[in-house]
Image (cartoon, coloured by chain):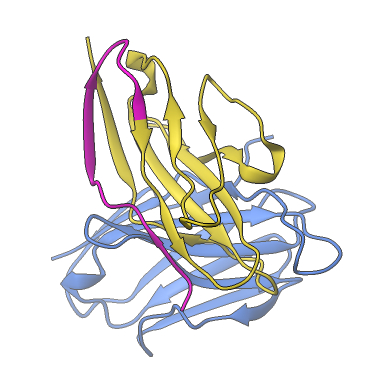
Amino acid sequence: DAGVIQSPRHEVTEMGQEVTLRCKPISGHNSLFWYRQTMMRGLELLIYFNNNVPIDDSGMPEDRFSAKMPNASFSTLKIQPSEPRDSAVYFCASSLTSGSTNSYNEQFFGPGTRLTVL
Amino acid sequence: AQRVTQPEKLLSVFKGAPVELKCNYSYSGSPELFWYVQYSRQRLQLLLRHISRESIKGFTADLNKGETSFHLKKPFAQEEDSAMYYCALKFAGRRALTFGSGTRLQVQP
């Protein structure tokens, strides 16, 4: 199993351009999480999906950010228009969740996408 | 608001020295706490969780509800322990984790 797959691994773009990050969760997992990692703020949750439905998007910085999960095996995080302050490493993670939200199921992380906005 | 604080961005120790990575949390309910680790060029991965009360790679962490802390400890650091360590909190009703800002551990030879 290749684990969580993210693409691209590196993205360099210019301010104002649209950026799309992609994630393929582990097969059979039903929860998917998008995190952003920066030096100053560490690892922050942007949004998570359960059974393809967005559950909590309170971490999405602003309207420039949007995320979709059209099916159980694919998710995208889009930034439009991108800004230099969006430069960070974006991680996708997935887990198999069952039962109540009080139970914890280990999250498995992808390798991340390093985004640089010039 | 729920928050996880890791006060040290960088902790540098010599091989064989004891290590303690600090983590404090703010949460009024019963927390679940975790330590995640990211080695160089590897994925972020779960190191241990407080419920398991286990020792992984020589690391232990005890939940102290009185001090709202979950410090990660190892009596004798090894060079291969050098990595980025994140403390994380899960609170009731939410599947996602709240992470601290991370501490980079450097173990020097």
* Closer-to-camera residue (A3/B54): B54
Residue B40 forms part of the magenta stretch: no
Asked if the magenta segment contains residue B11, the reply would be yes
For the N terminus of chain A, the quadrant is top right
Tell me residue B27's x, y (percent): 53, 70
B57 is higher (above) or lower (below) than B65: above
Q: Is residue A109 visible?
A: no
Q: Nearer the viewer, residue A40 or B27?
A: B27
Outermost right residue: A99
Residue A89 seen anywhere in this rendered image of the structure: yes
Residue B82 placement (x, y as % from top left) = 33, 25
**For the point 66% across and 30% down, which residue is it?**
B54
Q: From the viewer's side, name the closer residue of A34 and B46.
A: B46
- The residue at the point 59 percent across, 66 percent down is A75
- Tell me if A114 is positioned left or right of B49 in this view: left
B62 horizontally vs A85: left or right = right
A5 w.r.t. A50: above or below:
above
**Apparent colour of chain B:** yellow
Query: Looking at the image, is B20 positioned above or below residue A110?
Result: above
- Which portion, as a residue range, is magenta? B1-19
Dividing the picture into quadrants, the one containing residue B62 is top right
Quadrant showing the C terminus of chain A: bottom left
The answer to whether A82 is drawn above or below residue A95 in the figure is below
* Residue A2: % across, % down: 63, 36
Chain represented in blue: A
Please provide percent x and percent y for residue A66.
46, 81
Name the residue: 34% across, 20% down: B18
Q: Residue at x 30, y 16 (%)?
A: B17
- Quarter holding residue A98: bottom right
